[in-house]
Amino acid sequence: MTTALTSPELTLNDKAHTVIPQIGFGTFQIPADQTQRAVEEALEIGYRHIDTAAAYYNEEAVGAALKATGMAGKVFVATKLRNCDQGYDQTLIAFEESRRKLGLDVVDMYLIHWPMPRIDAYRQTWRALLKLREEGAIRVAGVSNFLPEHLEALREDSGELPAVNQIENHPRYSQPATRAYCAEHGVAVEAWSPLGHGGDMSAEPIVAAAEAHGVTPAEVVLRWHTQSGRIIIPKSKHPDRMRQNLASAGFDLTAAELAAIDALDAPEGRIGADPVTYVQSQSWADQKARGNV
Ligand SMILES: NC(=O)c1ccc[n+]([C@@H]2O[C@H](COP(=O)([O-])OP(=O)(O)OC[C@H]3O[C@@H](n4cnc5c(N)ncnc54)[C@H](OP(=O)(O)O)[C@@H]3O)[C@@H](O)[C@H]2O)c1
């Protein structure tokens, strides 16, 4: 396979100093019957980091793409534990199902999808992830949608913080408090919906920077993330956009441009759920009813 484009890499703060491609390919809401083709295209373009989740119901299609391209074990693959599978024993069972569907011996990164503090099982769930890492079944143990209070609870309970926290992060909702906690404690921030689900590209400082650098607003937003040290997993069904997104680290924004985009953050910019109150099961029926699969 010829690789036209490559992603910059980051070294995580875990004990193994795992290297992760900073620009990955997101697969949320790509229907399962289109996921294999989309992932094969992404791999052909040069992506070496694929983000999926048990709750996306497309892990098998991701696994099929890895197998068909001969890339299983050669690219960084992250998946996530469904909310309804939280708890120590249940996590270990659910992980085996994800590993089987992906067709991998070792999963590069396993994330707890949501903290669900009202269910209060995330500490035991985290201990199960640490066991999976000890056994070599996963390389990196991480979380998603965790606020500083949830991260602190993990640290107090297990003595260890996740290497990665995948959070909603785009210009209109960039979570400065959670980012500050993560920066202070060496937790890498991974931005989900880095383009604001496609809706954050029309703000004046983004359009102005795009004109100044001769690039698209999407490239400006993605470069704002990567220049700020975040991992990103933009999703697109279109190969030209996949290419554009992976190539987005080829120019530098000025400090003033970065600051102007930082200043777009606002509480009403959130597009996803509130991690404090979110308790959806993410079962197939639940995801179907929400239009997520
Ligand atoms: N952990 C979590 O709770 C969580 C939640 C949500 C998402 N995620 C992860 O984050 C990934 C990305 O999030 P997302 O899919 O919600 O949103 P996103 O990547 O911010 O935006 C995707 C949207 O932007 C469009 N787009 C992509 N590249 C573009 C470009 N260069 N120019 C113009 N438009 C472009 C896409 O349209 P086309 O497809 O038509 O190109 C799509 O509508 C997901 O796939 C998933 O892996 C995680």
Image: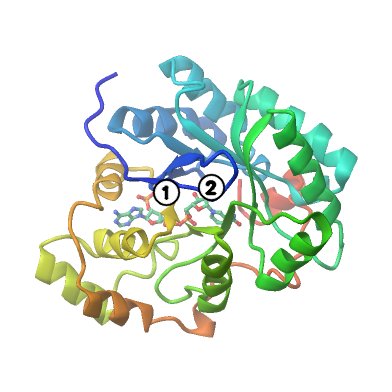
Horizontal side, residue 253 vs residue 190: left or right: left
Q: Quadrant of ligand 1?
A: bottom left
Q: Is residue 245 above or below residue 214?
A: above
Residue 116 can be seen, yes or no: no
Number of marks in picture: 2
Q: Residue at x 24, y 36 (%)?
A: 5
| Alpha carbon separation for disc pair 1 and 2 | 7 Å
Question: Dot 2, how many residues are within 10 Å of its Cα: few (below 14), some (14-19), or many (20+)?
Answer: many
| Figure quadrant of residue 165 | bottom right
Q: Which mark is residue 28?
A: 2
| Residue situated in front as seen by the camera: 212 or 13 | 13
The reply to whether the residue tagged 1 has its Cβ within 8 angstroms of ligand 1 is yes
Q: Which mark is residue 219?
A: none
| Figure quadrant of residue 89 | top right
Q: Quadrant of the C terminus?
A: top right
User: What's under tag 2, amino acid-wise?
Assistant: Phe
| Residue situated in front as seen by the camera: 157 or 234 | 157
Q: Is residue 208 above or below residue 155?
A: below
Q: Residue at x 47, y 59 (%)?
A: 193
The reply to whether the residue tagged 2 has its Cβ within 8 angstroms of ligand 1 is yes
Q: Residue at x 38, y 47 (%)?
A: 23
Sequence-first tag of 1 and 2: 2
Q: Residue at x 68, y 48 (%)?
A: 288
Disc 1 marks which residue? 235
Secondary structure category for the residue under label 2: loop
Q: CB atoms at circles 1 and 2 under 8 Å apart? A: yes
| Figure quadrant of residue 59 | top right
**Can you give x and y, in whole percent of width and height, for residue 248 in the image?**
25, 52
Secondary structure category for the residue under label 1: loop
Question: Dot 1, how many residues are within 10 Å of its Cα: few (below 14), some (14-19), or many (20+)?
Answer: many
